[in-house]
Image (cartoon, rainbow, N blue to C red):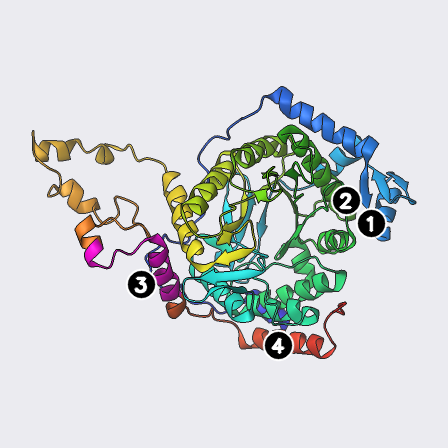
Amino acid sequence: MPRAERKSTGRRNRRAPRTKASFTQLPRRPFINTFKPVEIISEDQVEAIHLASLEILENIGIMVRLDEAREILKKAGQKVDEETQIVYFDRHFVLDALSHAPSEFTLHAPNPECDVPIGGDHMVFAMGASMPNSSDMDDGRRTGNQKDFRNFLRLAQSINVISTAGGYPVEPVDIHASIRHLECGRDFALLTEKPPYVYSLGRQKNLDCIEMTRIARGISMEQMLDEPSIFTIINSNSPLMLDVPMLQGIIEMAKHGQVVMLTPFTLAGAMAPVTIAGALAQQNAEALAGLSLAQTVRPGAPIVYGGFTSNVDMKSGAPAFGTPEYTKAAIATGQLIRRYNLPYRSSNVNASNAPDAQAAYESQMALWGAVLGHANFIKHATGWLEGGLTNSFEKVIIDVEMIQMMSEMMTPIDTSDAALGLDAMREAGHGGHFFGTQHTQERYESAFYSPILSDWRNFESWAEAGSPDAMMRANTIFKSILADYEAPAIDPAIRDELNEFVDKRIVEGGVATDF
């Protein structure tokens, strides 16, 4: 089918998503944060951090290690020291550049029903990503591989509260690094219908993944410029450095109108000052530097400010996540970002080595930081363990339960006359019960949140069933979802064009690596 014709047919031939009998979940719907943003620091304190970050940008500077990026900034009037590769960013330049960025935009999916709104009061959840290992109760902890990679994508496709895989859920090291982005990009397109991701690990990898995304949507590159359809995470090399592949990613993604999420990884006490205020000032400087470069390349390009400030265990130096400091930093970051009117990315993280109580309560702390800080895009929303070293299949289900409960908690309370239930009180009478009232009978199936993981049976019934704990139940659930998985429908012409492109690039050798 000619490309122009495919554009008018709605990209792909789609069928309505099935409701799986073995997995009852919330329907696909927008997640609107109905809470007012919490202010954990005063306006004066926000301003103090803002001014400190401008001082860093102007007088300490950011090391920008790509010649092309320094040239772009030099032409835009920024002071550049070529010997040290440090760029000194003028505050007026930075704030003017950010003023061109959209405060809200849509991340377009191959299936329009899976489009993702970014910004405003929207919250979207992306599966955990970039983990070198995966784990489950059956096979334990293991090195990332393509089989597990694909199964995580199948879960991302099947679970409604997950808006995108969010990256490689696990790194499939059994695919050579030179062609890994091609095989993974093809899997994104064939196994899911949600927006894909590209790692900014070199210019050509960005370009290949942008082209695969264009093919999967069945549109022209001109349409892609106006409809962001793929995103990348850019991590500054803290402290105060942007390295070559990340800078190439900023330039190519912005140039093509695709989404750049700039996220410094500032661990207080290690890669940033030991104080939360100092770590936030450094985070802010690094984020504003990279985001202002994206806006210099293409004013109005979609960007997201990512906050990832936490602390280390000062006894061992190990990263700590889901801490009070992490949660406070997430809320304060939201206050900073609202000053610049940009969308906000946060994460659901923990430092536990198993999907246990520690993993749950640290993740809950991280989720509250995202919710109360009014984050828009929650990366690593499911599966994260070991400070990001392992993606756990059981933890995916535990996190989905928590996210669904958050979603239900934000559903407005109905205070209509019918909901107030005065007629039910009259029918039940004094000392009666409400099980049999018409009011209850009309509502009992949908009155309350129905959990996917929690077990509400009494002790005797639970023990008779084998005393399954949350991890055992999560193991059963994720396997039942995979058993019921259905690949999304795809136009055969799109499939053929995608395979032709990927196979050609693989024959060409993909992207050269050092190993």
Residue 96 screen position, x and y as percent: 75, 35
> Residue flagged by tag 2: what amino acid is it?
Met
> Residue flagged by tag 3: what amino acid is it?
Ser
- What residue does disc 2 label? 241
Which of marks 1 and 3 precedes in the sequence?
A: 3
Q: Is residue 469 left or right of residue 41?
A: left
- What residue does disc 1 label? 65
Report if the CB atoms under discs 3 and 4 are less than 8 Å apart: no
Which of marks 2 and 1 precedes in the sequence?
A: 1
Q: Is residue 31 visible?
A: no
- What residue does disc 3 label? 22
Report if the CB atoms under discs 1 and 2 are less than 8 Å apart: yes
Report if the CB atoms under discs 3 and 1 are less than 8 Å apart: no
C-alpha gap between disc 3 and disc 4: 33 Å
Which of marks 2 and 3 precedes in the sequence?
A: 3
Of discs 3 and 2, which sits in the foreground? Answer: 2
